[in-house]
Amino acid sequence: MTANSRCSAAEPPGLDTQRREIESLLREWELRAGDSWYVVERRWYEQWKEFVETGDQNSSSFPGQIDNTELFEDLDSYHLKERLVENEDFMLVPAEAWHKLLAWYGMLEGQPPLERKVVDLPSTLKVEVYPVEIFLCLHSNMENVITAQFSRTDSIHSIQRAMCEAFSVPPGSECRLWMKSSDSTCERLRNVHVSVLDACLSSAMTVIMETRNADGTWPSSRPQIMRNSVEEQDSYRGQPGVCGLTNLGNTCFMNSALQCLSNTPPLTEYFLQSSYLEELNFTNPLGMKGEIAEAYADVIKQMWSGRHYSVVPRVFKTKVGHFASQFLGYQQHDSQELLSFLADGLHEDLNRVKNKEYIELRDAEGRPDQEVAEEAWRNHRRRNDSVIVDTFHGLFKSTLVCPECHKVSVTFDPFCYLSVPLPVSKERVMEVFFVSLDPYAKPAQHRVVVPKTGKVSDLCTALSEMTSVPPTQMVVADVFNHRFYKIYNTDESLSCILDRDDIFVYELSELEEHQEQHQEEQVLLALYLRERSHYRDYGSGSSSYGTSLFGHPLLLSVPRGCCSREELYTLFLQRLARYVRPPDPSEELEEEEEEELYKTQTNGISDGRVFSSNGSMEVPQQQTTVQLQECIELFTTMETLEEENPWYCPVCKKHQLATKKLDLWFLPEVLIIHLKRFSYTKFTREKLDSIVDFPLRELDFSGCLLRKSQSNGEPPSRYDLIAVSNHYGGLRDGHYTSYARNKDNGQWYYFDDSKVTYAREDQIVTNAAYVLFYQRQDKIRKPTLPAPNTSPASSSQPANDITSCKDDDITPCKEDDAELGAAAASSSYVTMETD
C-alpha cells in the first residue's frame, strides 16, 4: 500500500464505526506543540461525513479518494492558495484520524499529504497551516535561489541539512548559515539547534550558506595577510600548525597562549575534526553563547590549514575583549591569565551538561580517600563535561586542620592547571654607587646583599662594611636625569627601590666636636652640575648662554651657620677640586679662552664618566637554578593560612588560621604547570628570574601522586613536554614568545608573533619559561610525518618564510580593517557581518 492508493489490505470498518472513531478523535484530541495535523479539503470531508451518516457501503454519496485539488494554486508546485479559511475551505484532523482516513480511502495520485505542525506561539497553540517559505542559496552562487517551506518548529539544523542536500554540498563539509533581511544585511544563524520561530525567520527571507575555505577561513571574512597578496597565500603550502600570529599591538601574550594551545594535540584535533559543532552550548548562562569556541576554532583551522605564513587573530581578539573586559584595548597582559580565561570560556561554551543540577558538597568525615575522591569527581562531571575537562582537569586532595580543636577536613577539588611557587630567596642583591667625601676619589660601584624585606638602614649597614664609613654618615638617593628623584629616609622599605633605579649613597661630613656640643642644625644641600652651551641663544633676543644638567649631583651636609655665599662657594670648590680650579683675579681672559678653559675643567665630570668598580662588582651574580620537582614539592608543602584568608571551623564555629596541605590525587592527559614568577607580598613586588630546570621527557609524578594507577593498571605519572610560554622582561613590561612541538612531524619550533623558526631542544630551558605544557606519555602518538632536515644553525632559520613584524608597539592598522571589509564584501552584494 502507498500513500496515494486506497487500502486494499483490509476492508474498512462499518460506516457507523468510521464515524464514531473519527468524531471521537476530533472531539478528544488536544493541540500539543510539535504534533502533526493534516489539512483536508472541506468539500471532500463534508461528503465523507454525509456518506458515513446517511449512506451505506454502496451509496452514491461515496467520497472517493482524498482530494485536496481545490486548495492548491496549481497542480505543478502544489502551493497552497493564499488566505484559506479553516472550516470554510479546509478541515484540520489529527495525525491518527488522518492515517485512518488515508488507510480507508487512499489519496488522489500525485498529491502530497498536507502535514502541518502544532506550534507554540507566545499567546496560543495553533496548527501552522502556512509554513515559513524561505529562499535558499549558496554564498558562492547567490544567483541560484530555491524556495523551500519549513515549520516554525523545525530547527535551523533541518534547514542546513536540506540545503546540503539541495546544493550537493560534500558530506563532512563545515558550513554556517546567515539570515538575510530585506536591507541586504546578514545576521549569523549561530545556534542550529533553535527553531525557525526562535530564530525569527519569516517568509520571504533568504538563508545563505557558506562552506569553510581550504585555508581555514570563511568566504565572508577572509583576512588579507599583511604584505602578502591573496595569490601568494593561495599558492603557499607549509607544514600545518607552523604558522605565526600577527601582533595587533601588545598582543604577544595572546599569541604565546594560542600557540601553546594550538600545539596541544587532543584539543586541536577536536576542533580540526569539527567535533565542537555538535557540542556548542548556546544556553549556558556561564558561557559565551558559543562565540569564544567558534572564534577559537576559526583561528585553529587557519593555523592548521598549511596555507598561511601568519594569521591575523583580530576577530578572536575582539571576542575575548567583548566577554572579558580586562583584555579590552591593546595593553600588555599575562599569558597565563588569558589561558585561564580561555580554558574556562571554551569549557562553558562546549559543556555537554545543559542543565546544571545543584549538588551539595560533603566532607570526607572519615571515609576512605578513594570513596571521597570518586564521589567528588563524579559530582564534578555531573555539572562539567567538556573536551576541556577531558583534556586538562585533574583532582587534588585538600587537607585542613584546625589549630584549636584539631578538626580535620578533607575535600577533593578539580583543577585545570597547577600554579607552583618558586623557592624565594630571603636576600636581595643591590647595585649602588658610593660617593665619598674625598673629592679626589671616584664614585665607586658596589654590589651588596640585603634582606629582601629590609629597610634603607640595612643597605647603609651593608655598605658600611665595605667602605668603613659609619651608616649614620650616609644618605641614600635615587638619581634620575642628572637630578635627585627621591631622597630616602632610613626607615623606608627597600621594596620601594627597583632594580633598574640608579641609587647613589653619599658620605656626609662628620660633625666636629664643638658643633656637637652646640647641637648646631645641619642643612642638607643638593649641588647640581649645569653645563653652559657653546653658543649664545641669539634667537631669544638674549646674548646669554643656555645651560643643561650633566653628570651626577652631589649632597652636602652643612652647619646652618656656615651657609653664607662665600662659605658655600669655598665648600663647593673643595668638593669639585678634582675638576675645577679657582679663578685667578689677576688673569684676564678673552671670551673664547674662558670658554675653552671651562670645557677643559668640566671635561672630567661629563666624561662617562668617572666610576670605579669595587671588588664586589667583579664577582658575577650567580643565576639561581631550581628543579621543577622542587617547585612541585613546594606546592604540596603544608602551610598556615594567612589572616586575610582564614578557614571556618564547623566545630569551633569560628574562623581559624588552619594548616593546609595540597596533594595530587590524579593528573589529566595534558598537564599545564604555571611557574609563579611574579611575586606579590606585603613587602615586595618582583619577577623571579630563576632558571627552572624542567625535563623535556620523563617528568615523573610517581613519588607525589596519591592515586597510583588508572583503572587499566597503567601508571599515569610520566609526561613529556609539548609547549612552553616564555616571558622576557620585568613586572611592568616585557615580551611573550613560545616553544612548541608540532604533533605531526615532532619538530620543535620557536614562535615569536608572526615569525616562526626551527628550535633545538637545548634552547628550550631558559629563565624566561613561564607556563609549561606536558602530555602524558601513553597518550602521545608517534609523528605521522618525518621531521624536516635542519642544519645545526637552523634555529635562526625562518620556518614559515616570513619576516617578523616585531614588536609589541604595533598599533591596530586601519588598512588591515579596510582589507577585511573589502574581502567580506567582494563575493556578494550583501554585508556578511563578521562576528
Image (spheres, rainbow, N blue to C red):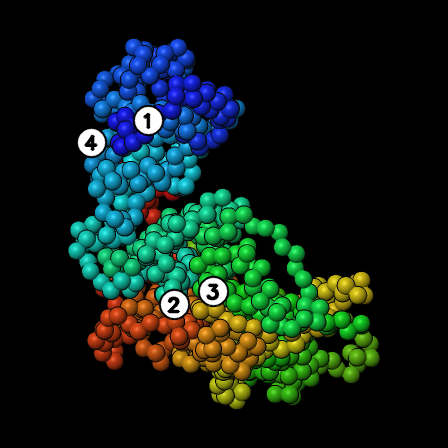
Instruction: Name the residue rendered at 62%, 83% in the picture.
Output: 463
In the image: residue 315, left or right of residue 215: right
Q: Quadrant of residue 810?
A: bottom left
Question: Which residue corresponds to mark 1?
Answer: 11
Say if 442 sits above or below 599 in the image: below
Q: Residue 392 bears which disc, if any? A: 3
Q: How far apart are marks 2 and 1 (CA)?
A: 79 Å
User: Residue 523: x and y, percent?
Assistant: 71, 69
Q: Distance between the residues labelled 3 and 2?
A: 19 Å
Name the residue at 36% across, 54% down: 275
Label 4 secondary element: strand
Image quadrant where one finds the N terminus:
top left
Answer with mark 2 or mark 4, whichever residue precedes in sequence: 4
Amino acid type indicated by mark 4: Glu
Q: Which of marks 1 and 3 is nearer the N terminus?
A: 1
Instruction: Give the labeled residue for mark 2.
Output: 738
**Front label number (2 vs 4):** 4
Up/down of 808 relative to 512, above or below? above
Distance from the alpha carbon under mark 4 to that under mark 1: 52 Å
Specify few, some or many for label 4: CA neighbours under 10 Å numbering under 14, 14-19, or 20 or more. Answer: few
Q: Name the residue under label 4.
A: 143
Answer few, some or many: residues within 10 Å of disc 3's Cα (few below 14, many 20 plus, some between 14 and 19).
many
